Amino acid sequence: MIFSPDFFPCIDYIRHLPVEDTVWINTAGQYRKQSYHTRAYVLGPHRVETLLVPVKKFANHELIRNIEIDYSTAWERKAWRTLINVYRNSPFFEYFEDYIYKVFAKRHERLVDLNCDTLTICLKLMGVDKTICLQDFSYYEYKNQFISFNAKNRGENAANLPFKPYIQNFGNKFEPNLSILDLLFMKGPESWTTVREPI
């Protein structure tokens, strides 16, 4: 399978990663507005909140590899404050916060590099050893190998498989398919086992 570069990917993205050691990321895909390219969902005390990465203006049909991040709004500080507010009391926040903070502090120029870093650090924190390879893939040649996830229909996971519930920070109702950050802060090193377990 060939994946898109997503920002702190959703849980469904993580559980579809191949058993092989290499994860292929397509950098030649067209950038999609309001997609997981620039947003990650986390659970706040009253609602699901969105971490957003603003991008600079670009031409229509621009490729994801050319999209640059806009730092004029200090979005990274806002996103980090949101994570602190919703997860500081979670079981594993104090163990992982330094690693996650470094991703926000790095000031990546390109969106694809930021997103590659978010996937890399999340896999590392789960204890998963995989090589992430960025490559331009032709849609026509590889169209049957692409897998993508729709941020607008977050609860409808790609394979129509039920999610295995886990205890979350807020609410009595399980909120499925949030960013992998939600699972990491709640389950820590058990995250990979949790996400791969059959129902």
Image (cartoon, grey):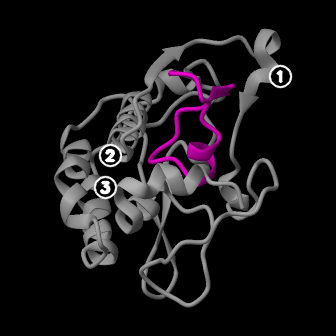
Q: Does the magenta stretch include residue 12?
A: yes
Task: Provide the residue designation for mark 2.
Answer: 125
Q: Is residue 143 left or right of residue 68?
A: right
Q: Nearer the viewer, residue 184 or 5?
A: 184
Dots 3 and 2: beta carbons under 8 Å? no
Give the residue type that dot 2 points to. Answer: Leu
Real-space CA distance between mark 3 and mark 1, rounded to the nearest whole angstrom? 35 Å
The picture quadrant where one finds residue 81 is bottom left
Q: Is residue 163 magenta?
A: no
Q: Which mark lies nearer to you, 1 or 2?
A: 2
**Sequence order check: which comes first, mark 1 or mark 2?**
2
Q: In this view, does 142 lie to the left or right of 95?
A: right
**Sequence order check: which comes first, mark 3 or mark 2?**
3
- Mark count: 3
Q: Nearer the viewer, residue 44 or 34?
A: 44
The secondary element bearing badge 3 is classed as helix
Q: Give the range drawn in magenta.
A: 1-21
Q: Which of 151 and 126 is in front in this view?
A: 126
Q: Which mark lies nearer to you, 3 or 2?
A: 2
Give the residue type that dot 3 points to. Answer: Trp
Give the residue type that dot 1 points to. Answer: Asn
Identified at 19% across, 44% down, the residue is 102
Identified at 45% across, 23% down, the residue is 132
Magenta-drawn stretch, dominant element (helix, strand or loop): loop
Task: Provide the residue designation for mark 1.
Answer: 144
Identified at 52% across, 82% down, the residue is 47
Task: Provide the residue designation for mark 3.
Answer: 75
Identified at 37% across, 28% down, the residue is 113
Q: In the rendered image of this protein, does residue 153 appear above or below residue 115?
A: below
**Sequence order check: which comes first, mark 3 or mark 1?**
3
The secondary element bearing badge 2 is classed as helix
Real-space CA distance between mark 3 and mark 2, rounded to the nearest whole angstrom? 24 Å
